[in-house]
Each structure stands twice: as structure tokens, then as C-alpha cells.
Image (cartoon, rainbow, N blue to C red):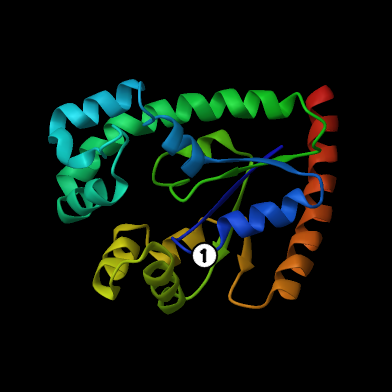
Amino acid sequence: MTIGVTGGIASGKSTVARTFAAHGISWVDADEVAREVVEPGEPALAEIAARYGETVLTAEGRLDRRALRDIVFREPAERRWLESVTHPRIRQRLLEYLRTMREGASPYHLLVSPLLFESGQHELVDRTLVIDVPETLQIARTASRDDVDEAQARAIVAAQMPRDERLSRADDVIDNSGDTQALEYRVAELDRKYRELSRKLAISRKL
């Protein structure tokens, strides 16, 4: 069984995934895959450089993420273009990772993606888990973590799916505004649930 894990920026998706990993659960992070597809030598990076020029490249020829982010968050049409270039490639590589994980020993696995619903990646999963925190906390964490000002942090949050809509589409929710102990307890609770659901799913597929 594949569990899709999503949430707004700075909600703690990777922290949640690592907590599941402590229970022996494998996972793939769509953000990591998104970085892979724009590495030097990848077709997506060549397309991006052809559109924006060297202003979005570092001296070493790698993608300058901050420069590109400034463009796409200022111009919605540019963000849509970028997604048209990267999303199909990300999806194909995710499918390859998921295929490998299904052949492994993990009783279920996670697809962690900030754009699970927006990109259509929810079609690749059996169940969705939303990591939720208040928007004020998202903005503060984003500004601190990514070294951006509050206005840009707000713009990043505003560009994502509204919190209420994301929650309405969740099968399960983790409130990640508490402490580490509360998170670990909730993950352990869901781990037991997902193991049982995976066992039942495996049986139903054999019938």
C-alpha cells in the first residue's frame, strides 16, 4: 500500500517521514526527485536555462533555486510553464521508485509530496495523510528556514492549496504543531493502522 503524505511548506513532512522510517517504513520524497530532474545534464535543466538564461544558473552550471523561485512566484504563468516541464519527469521517476519499494520488505511505503493533490500525484497512492500546522507557524518556519522575508514566505504559502481544501481531501491528519513526543505517538498509532490496512489490502488482491 502506498500512503501519500502531504502538507503545506514547513509543515514537517520530512520529519514525519523519518519518524515512520524508524518503524521500518520506506519512503520517497518528491522534493528530492524534483531536485534530481534538474541536475546538470538533465533535459529539464536545459529547457529552463534556454528559457531564462544564465541568470538561473550558478557559476558551476547548477540551478540557482532562489533566482528561479523569484521568477515563478512573481509570475503565475511562469510557474505553470515550469510545472509543465518538471512535473511529468518527476512523476515518471516517482513511478520507478514506487515500483522498487513495492518489491521491498516494507509493509507499506510513503510518497511524500508537497504537491500531492495539485500535481495529480494523489492518483499514485492508496490513501492520503496530511501534515497540518497553522499558517502563522508555516510562515515563521519558512522565513527562518529558507532565509526569506515574511512577505515572500506569505507569498509561498498563498501559492499553495488552501489549508481547508487540503484537509478536506485527507484520509488521515497529523497535527504537527505539538512536540516531538506527540508526533511520535501519532505516527506509531498510524503505523499500526496502516500495517493492518496493508494486510487486508494484500488479502483482497489475492481473492
Residue 34, x across and y down, in percent: 43, 37
Say which residue appears at 65% left-offset and 52% top-offset: 17
Instruction: Give the residue type at disc 1.
Output: Ser
Image: 152 above or below 194: below
Disc 1 crowd rating (10 Å Cα; few below 14, some 14-19, many 20+) is: many
Q: Residue furthest front?
A: 59
In front of the other: 34 or 164: 34
Judged left or right of residue 115, residue 6 is right
In front of the other: 10 or 8: 10
In front of the other: 69 or 27: 69
Residue matched to label 1: 11
Task: Examine the rendering and report whether any part of residue 158 can be seen.
Answer: yes
> Which secondary structure, mark 1?
loop
Judged left or right of residue 93, residue 159 is left
Say which residue appears at 73% left-offset and 52% top-offset: 20
Task: Examine the rendering and report whether any part of residue 207 can be seen.
Answer: no
Figure disc tally: 1
User: Quarter of the image holding residue 120?
Assistant: top left
Residue 119, x across and y down, in percent: 40, 40
Look at the image and tell me in which quarter the C terminus lies.
top right
Look at the image and tell me in which quarter the N terminus lies.
top right
Say which residue appears at 16% left-offset and 41% top-offset: 55
Residue 45, x across and y down, in percent: 29, 28
In front of the other: 50 or 104: 50
Say which residue appears at 21% left-offset and 54% top-offset: 70
Judged left or right of residue 45, residue 125 is right
Judged left or right of residue 207, residue 77 is left
